[in-house]
Each structure stands twice: as structure tokens, then as C-alpha cells.
Amino acid sequence: MTAAQRIVSASAGPAIAFNDVSLVLGRTTILDQVSFQVRPGSVHALVGPNGGGKSSLIKTLLGQMPHCGQLSLRWPGEPGIIGYVPQALDFDRGLPMTVDDFMAAMCQRRPAFLGLSRRYSKAIAQALERVGMQDKRKRRMGALSGGERQRVLLAQGLIPSAQLLVLDEPMSALDEAGIQVFERLLGDWRQAAVTVLWIEHDLEAVKRLADQVTGLNRRVLFDAPPAQALTPERLLTLFSTHPRGTDAGPAL
């Protein structure tokens, strides 16, 4: 093994195993014995209808929701860093918070009103440059377009460098230029052997960019490479099936 290969191996992402993971809130079954595995260093997409349990599943992974069953992360060495990029940012758009202020609040312990610390200033500048937002650092977050705010969310997901990235519909508000930025980032993460678990509704993007696809509608309906997973028959079943043993409930 070369020195470069050892560096990649040491910083590689984990394998993830979901074994009979279930989640019931009240009388509503949100997840029903979900079982599948995510290969280390792969880009693994989760697809399915709204309310099918995708966001709830990643919240169980992040320790934000209770569950039954087993969920394990198998790191190649010492446990690494987990990064998370939410679908959207919920905040008061009237706040006088600039892009720099937001990045400082997300990435450093020092209060944002004291400005960027030297420790994180360079990393924040590099992250914003990677997503094409370096020239918008002094703009108010509330004045940005939806796509620009999404790019800032992607930037905060880059600090610190994570070995496991959980992405909740990161392309939802991106314009064409933003989509190209995201695809470049995905290529960088794949090259660095980062494990990416990616919720996405854009099935064409999933077909082009994912290594493996799991169809989730309260339970796993398929788990296969994109060409085998995203067939018309399987997608029809995924988006039209009401899973047995579940009551109608809120979309989670």
C-alpha cells in the first residue's frame, strides 16, 4: 500500500448497517423493519415519496429520533466526523446575519458577533470558494436566493472535513450552476472515499451520480444499483404503494 493509499484509507468513511430498524410514533408506523447496508466510501441514495420515512431514517442515524432494531457504523479506524446538510434553513430573513456570520456560528465555538476566528477563517474562505459563494460573504443571508442559501449550507457541511456526509435533498433549490457545484463536490467526496448517504427526489440525478439506490416507503422496497433500481415498474410500486400495517400519519 502506498503512502497516498494509507492516507485515503485512514480518512475513509464508514460502512453503515440498518438491521430491522423500526420507528413508531403514537399509532403511526414511520419505519417498518428497514434493513440495508451502505458500502464505505460510496454514494448511496435514498428515494421515495414524501412521508415515506426518509428524513426520519437519517434522524435515527444522527441520534435525533428513537428506534427499535440495530443501526451500526463500522469505521475503518478511529471514529471520524459526521457532517449533515439539511434540506433548507429556517430562520428570520430580517436578521442582519451575513454569510460570514452564519458560517462562523456553524463552524466555531467563538460567538459569531466577535467575527471569524483565525482557526476557521481560512477553512471558511476555502469552503465558500468551493461552492462559488466567496464573493457573497458580506451579503445578508435573508437577501440570498434559495439556491444561494443552499450553497452556503453545502459550504458549512465541508467544515470540518467529514468522513460520513448525510445530505437531505441538497439539490432542491439549486439552479443549474449550483447543480454543477454539487456534482463537483460529489466527485471530490467519492475520490476521497467519503461515505455519502443522500436523500434525493431528482431521479435523473440519482441515476447519473449514485452508486447504490434504496427505495423507501416506510419499508425497503428495493436496494440495487441505479440501472436496476430506477425502472418504471419499481418506481411505480415505490410511489403508489401504501405499506401494509401502517396508519395514515404526518409526513416525516
Image (cartoon, rainbow, N blue to C red):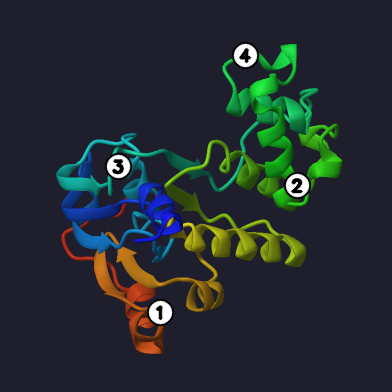
In the picture of the structure, the residue carrying the numbered disc 1 is 226
Q: Distance between the residues labelled 2 and 1?
A: 31 Å
Circles 1 and 4: CB distance less than 8 Å? no
Q: Which of marks 4 and 3 is nearer the N terminus?
A: 3
The relative height of residue 78 versus residue 56 in the rendered view (above or below) is above
| Secondary structure of residue under mark 4 | loop
Q: Which amino acid does label 4 sit on?
A: Arg
Is 129 situated above or below 125?
below
Q: Name the residue under label 2.
A: 129
Inter-mark Cα distance, 4 to 2: 22 Å
Q: Which mark is on residue 110?
A: 4
Decide if residue 120 is on the left or right side of residue 12: right
State which tag comes first along the sequence, 2 or 1: 2
Closer to the eye: label 4 or 3: 4
**Percent coordinates x, y for residue 38 in the rendering:** 30, 61
Residue 217, x across and y down, in percent: 31, 64
Check disc 3 and give the amino acid type: Thr
For the residues bearing labels 2 and 1, Cβ distance under 8 angstroms? no
Q: In the rendered image, which quarter contains the N terminus? A: bottom left
Residue 247 visible in this rendered orientation of the protein: no
Place of residue 128 in the rendered image (x, y in percent of width and height, measured from the top left): 72, 43
Of marks 3 and 2, which one's residue comes earlier in the chain?
Answer: 3
The type of residue carrying mark 2 is Glu
Q: Is mark 1 on a helix, strand or loop?
A: helix
Q: Residue at x 49, y 72 (%)?
A: 206
Mark 3 vs mark 2: give the one in front. 2
Q: Nearer the viewer, mark 2 or mark 1?
A: 2
Within-10-Å neighbours for mark 4: few <14, some 14–19, many 20+: few
Distance of label 1 from label 4 (alpha carbons) = 43 Å
* The image quarter in which residue 214 lies: bottom left
Numbered label tally: 4
The disc label shown at residue 60, or none: 3
